[in-house]
């Protein structure tokens, strides 16, 4: 891909060169490979211990290289937010892809069926009889498409709104020759980010009671779900205790952005995962005593969360403020005395999924040495 | 480029096919070519009448195709926010590129000098003696690099903070054999978006008085600026009256996003420019009476401005709310009765520059027919 070639042409010669992280053009998305590998191993071990199937969510990383490491550590397959993301991972020979949003339009359904013919174990969610009818009309009994019933956790984004609707949809899927009824999905996105462990647990217990009732209704109708998929980085330890999900869609544990770092993931508050993803920026202007301007702004971080935290290269307590598309201020008393033009400042990532989407590649480091350059394989693949 | 090839492979067969805008996979960035051409012509005529040089800002569109049309209409060259943007436009043979942010690090300065050797009329800003020294050390008298003194309009992002510092920097540039003193840049970004014409005028009059004093100080020091570059879509009509800028860096007039559409650009409030840029999305879930979910979220729009306005495909008064990376709600009483799965909803663009950065290509339409697919040539080029 040309995007990768651009970064490889610019930085490929720095791979393996001691301390080469400091020689990179900025802003640059930096992935700490040691931390990534520890996160992948920790989650794989927990899922194995819990006896649940792990299907990590690729919406976080959009990367064939990360997906391969997750599969090598035991993941069954990968979840994808959109069809385009699944196409990008399938091109990297990742199998058992599950698309977690409905695919509804005629051109998208045509692409979905083409992907199903070449990608083993593909599945998708549905939440509407009209969509199931369209999928059934396009599917082939020779190569059935897996379909999950998507359950609305109460935010009205996607999903059926009642147990009766879930049963009707499961029945419709089950009856369609070209579709295979795979089970149900319930993704409680809102609950993932509740910072207090106790409050998050109370919220997810209530959601899980409702899910158990849905499962009972399906079972009573003769449609027991083969797979119950859901969970996330915020709740998977609680979901493990509750024991209802048979498959986890955890995503952000690989990177641990600011949002999840603010959450107590365990009862004792000790995180089993560590930050692995950063943006390195450089000072490009230093004419004011209490701030320096760095070369990272709206195009370097998604702005749907709080501004990024300052991790290294600036005095303790320095904070970041956006200054437009290309620039940010790093603010601390007397900062311009300690920092000079071109100095490196390392920032955390506020919300990893849409931030990763802004970059063509990961600059993968071990300590301060560039180890590899990986494409963000599904960057921009929102279709 | 592979990015373009992806969209061409997906949609190339629809070019010229009547009504084919409605057959596109979504979300998709749609550019109305008739409106774009009218905007480009209107600005070119105004600049010619005002006797100012037009160097439109490519940070808005990041597109060789749009830049070519601006040059064909009389623009002298293009402004670029970053070196990487300039490299992308130079690859499309756009000349007289001016980089409006300082280029400071050693790897970036090396790229800048390489670009200067192949891109006629290149210039950059500087705001610090250390940066001018680094540029001077890397530059060659055989192929001098144009340098403008950047003036801080009071936001402390970039620019010298005093007239004395401006004079010192101009003198240092002028004395360097490999650098050419080109003049000054003062970009009043904050003032561009003041919605009231009268308030914006008062603010820009004050900035212009300060700029006139800076110019007088430079002239008194024997360094009269050959070019005074600045202005923007919000203030260019006022700048025309004030007559201090000799070059306009206007950008957003080509698209007229929500931010600028909210501004009275003229005293009578009639806009000389019209919206040309949209995002088409599709309904992917419709299980709630008062909202439908469309396939456009944080990855389809930058979120540094207000959420996008709903332009077409939904009842009058419908509003958009973000629902995560991939989804948005379009909300209106009884909306799910009128809208079905896969129906198209057209949304405006809240802030064009970082929104364009999320897409690989423009889907260029005349009326409802896909006319062409243009790459976003400098997408992701923040380095």
Image (spheres, coloured by chain):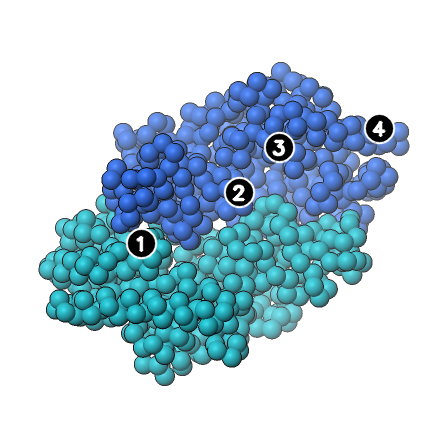
Chain colours: A cyan, B blue
Residue A158, labelled with which disc?
Answer: 1
Judged from the image, the secondary structure of the residue bearing numbered disc 2 is: loop
Where in the figure is residue A54, as x and y percent of width and height? Answer: 34, 73
* Residue found at x 79% / y 31%: B210
The image quadrant that residue A52 belongs to is bottom left
Q: Earlier in the sequence, mark 2 or mark 4?
A: 4
Distance of label 1 from label 3 (alpha carbons): 38 Å
Where in the figure is residue B256, as x and y percent of width and height? Answer: 51, 31
Which chain does tag 3 point to?
Answer: B
Residue beneath disc 3: B194
Residue A275, labelled with which disc?
Answer: none
Indicate which label's residue lies in the foreground, 2 or 4. 2
Discs 2, 1: same chain: no
* In front of the other: A315 or B330: B330
Judged from the image, the secondary structure of the residue bearing numbered disc 3 is: loop
Distance of label 3 from label 2 (alpha carbons): 14 Å
Residue beneath disc 4: B216
Residue B305, labelled with which disc?
Answer: 2
């Amino acid at each position: 891909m040309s995007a990768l070639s651009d970064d490889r042409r610019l930085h490929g010669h720095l791979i393996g060169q001691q301390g080469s992280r400091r020689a990179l053009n900025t802003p640059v998305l930096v992935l700490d490979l040691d931390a990534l590998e520890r996160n992948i191993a920790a989650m794989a071990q927990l899922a194995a211990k819990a006896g649940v199937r792990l299907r990590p969510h690729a919406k976080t990383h959009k990367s064939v290289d990360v997906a391969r490491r997750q599969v090598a550590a035991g993941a069954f397959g990968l979840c994808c937010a959109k069809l385009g993301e699944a196409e990008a991972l399938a091109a990297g020979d990742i199998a058992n892809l599950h698309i977690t949003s409905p695919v509804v339009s005629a051109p998208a359904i045509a692409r979905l069926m083409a992907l199903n013919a070449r990608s083993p174990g593909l599945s998708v969610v549905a939440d509407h009889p009209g969509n199931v009818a369209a999928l059934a009309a396009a599917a082939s009994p020779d190569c059935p498409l897996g379909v999950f019933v998507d359950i609305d956790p109460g935010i009205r984004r996607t999903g059926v709104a009642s147990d009766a609707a879930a049963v009707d949809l499961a029945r419709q899927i089950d009856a369609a020759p070209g579709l295979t009824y795979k089970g149900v999905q319930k993704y409680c996105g809102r609950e993932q980010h509740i910072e207090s462990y106790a409050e998050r647990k109370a919220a997810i217990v209530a959601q899980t009671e409702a899910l158990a009732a849905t499962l009972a209704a399906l079972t009573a109708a003769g449609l027991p779900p083969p797979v119950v998929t859901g969970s996330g980085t915020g709740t998977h330890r609680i979901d493990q205790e509750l024991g209802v999900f048979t498959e986890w869609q955890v995503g952000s544990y690989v990177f641990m952005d600011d949002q999840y770092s603010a959450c107590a993931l365990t009862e004792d508050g000790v995180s089993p995962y560590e930050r692995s993803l950063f943006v390195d920026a450089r000072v490009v202007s230093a004419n004011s005593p209490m701030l320096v301007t760095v070369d990272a702004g709206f195009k370097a971080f998604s702005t749907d969360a709080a501004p990024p935290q300052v991790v290294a290269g600036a005095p303790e307590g320095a904070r970041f403020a956006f200054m437009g598309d290309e620039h940010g201020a790093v603010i601390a008393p007397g900062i311009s005395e300690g920092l000079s033009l071109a100095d490196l400042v390392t920032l955390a990532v506020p919300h990893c999924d849409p931030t990763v989407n802004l970059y063509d590649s990961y600059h993968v480091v071990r300590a301060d040495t560039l180890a590899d350059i990986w494409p963000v394989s599904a960057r921009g693949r929102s279709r």
